[in-house]
Structure formats: C-alpha cells, structure tokens
Image (cartoon, rainbow, N blue to C red):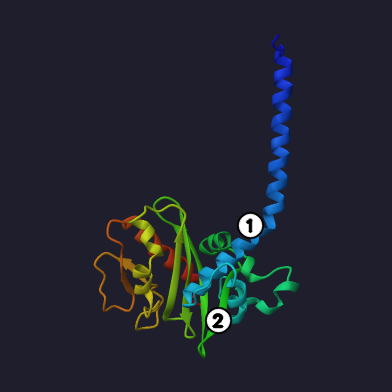
Amino acid sequence: MKPKFTNRYIIIYAAVLVAVVAVILSVASEALRSRKEANARNEKMQNMLAAIGVQSDLDNANTLYSKYFVEELAIDGSGEVVARFQPADAKNAKERPFDIDVKAQQTLAKEGKDCRLPLFRYQKDGAEGYVVPLHGAGLWGPIWGYVALNEDFTTVVGVSFDHKGETPGLGAKITTPEFQSQFVGKKIRNSDGEFVSVQVLKNADKSSDNEVDAISGATITSTGVGQMLRECLEPYAN
C-alpha cells in the first residue's frame, strides 16, 4: 500500500524544507560575504588603476593600488579637504574615503547639501594627479567610472567607464578602448579657465579640447556619460 499523506503533513514538510534551505543559503551567503566584499573592492581598484593606464587583475589590484595611489582625500561641497588617508594604513583604518558611497554623496552635492566627496591622489612615472569617481544613468540602468586628471586638475589623463545593462554593441561600447581613448588629453576647462567638463557630442569637433564623439546609435547612453562627467566633476572644480 502507498503511504497516505495528509494535507497537514505536506504543509509541515514543505515548511520544514523551505526553512532548511533558507538556513543553508543564509549560512553560505554569510560565509562568502568577506570574499564578495574583497572582490568588489579589488574590482574598484582595478577600474581606478585602468583610469591611470595601469592594467591589473583581482590578484594584484590591491598591491598596485598601494603602489600608485598615495593619498585618499574627502572634500566638502566647497572643495575644502576634510579628511586625508594614506592607503598604506588601510589595515588599521575604520573609515576611509575609499569607502564613501559616491552616489549618495554626489546626490547631496547636486542638492547643495553637506557632503563628503572622495578624491584619490596618485603618482606615476614621476608625475602626479587625481582620480575622481563618477556615477550616472545610462539608457537601461546606472553607469559609473573614474576620470584621472593631471596635477593642474584640468587635463584628462585617462578614463574608465562601466555599466550595468547597456545595449551590447551600442551603449555598452562606453567600456571599449576606442571610446575611452578619445578623452585622453581633453580638458575640463576652456581657454578662459572656466569649468566646462568634456562634452560627448554627435559629430564632435575633434580639434576641440572639450569635445569627444558620441557612440553612433547610442545617443542616450552617450548623453548620460556627458552628463555624468559634468555633474560629478563640477563639485570638484573649486
């Protein structure tokens, strides 16, 4: 005879099974949290290194970051430095500019409220400069990146862009060397020293110090990159 299972038995069995699976997933998630956080931090370092022209991977990103980035700063909306941190002291740090929520603080800056914006100083090949984190919106979701500026805080040394879900072959091209290389040597100020950012335009004037070509067929994403640069760099212009 086949065993008879009552509705009560089935409900209890299902509830116990769901509870067991939930506990297993929770334990697994907690066990992997530190690894996921480390990978996220290393990926962030990779992107910052890429902006200054240093290639890295998850294994050596932390070492190379400590080699090239000599200081992490936090500035307020007026451009005043409110915190300084040496990457070499990372093991003893409880709070550092590296961990600032860029999106949240840039939102506060745009609203004219008190904010703490991260700024990263680097040294490479005898030269010094700064890296500014970026966060904006593309066609299908968030876009973000980093722009490296030379010591005069005017000339672009390099950029690194990424996205969550832009269209492959179109908006996703913001991650390609072909698009990003256009920014090298461009300036975020005009000849009068006024902040103008770098504009991303269709049929841009290649001789201009402040314009780069938009991606063909990806107008909204290209516009998003230009807007992201302008809005995120402006608080640092002081």
> Tag 2 or tag 1, which sits nearer the N-term?
1
**What kind of residue is marked 1?**
Lys
Q: Is residue 85 visible to us here?
A: no
Q: Residue at coordinates 64% horizontally, 66% vertically from top-left? A: 99
Disc 1 to disc 2, how far (Cα)?
26 Å
Q: Nearer the viewer, mark 1 or mark 2?
A: 1
Q: Is residue 232 visible to us here?
A: yes
Q: Residue at coordinates 62% horizontally, 76% vertically from top-left? A: 63
Residue 70 occupies quadrant: bottom right
Residue 180 occupies quadrant: bottom left
Circle 2 is placed at which residue position? 122
Near-viewer residue (162 or 106): 162
Mark 1 element type: helix
Q: Looking at the picture, how far across and down is residue 7, in whole percent?
A: 70, 14
Near-viewer residue (91 or 198): 91
| Structural crowding at the residue carrying mark 1, measured as other residues with C-alpha within 10 Å and reported as few (<14), some (14–19) or many (≥20) | few
Q: Quadrant of the N terminus?
A: top right
Which label number is shown at residue 71? none
- Please state the total of marks drawn on the protein image: 2
Q: Looking at the picture, how far across and down is residue 74, in whole percent?
A: 62, 73
Residue lying furthest top in this view? 1
Q: Residue at coordinates 72% horizontally, 24% vertically from top-left? A: 13
Circle 1 is placed at which residue position? 36
- Residue 4 to residue 190: above or below: above
- Residue 98 to residue 169: above or below: below
Q: Looking at the picture, how far across and down is residue 6, in whole percent?
A: 72, 13
Left of 51 or right of it: where is 41? right
**What kind of residue is marked 2?**
Tyr
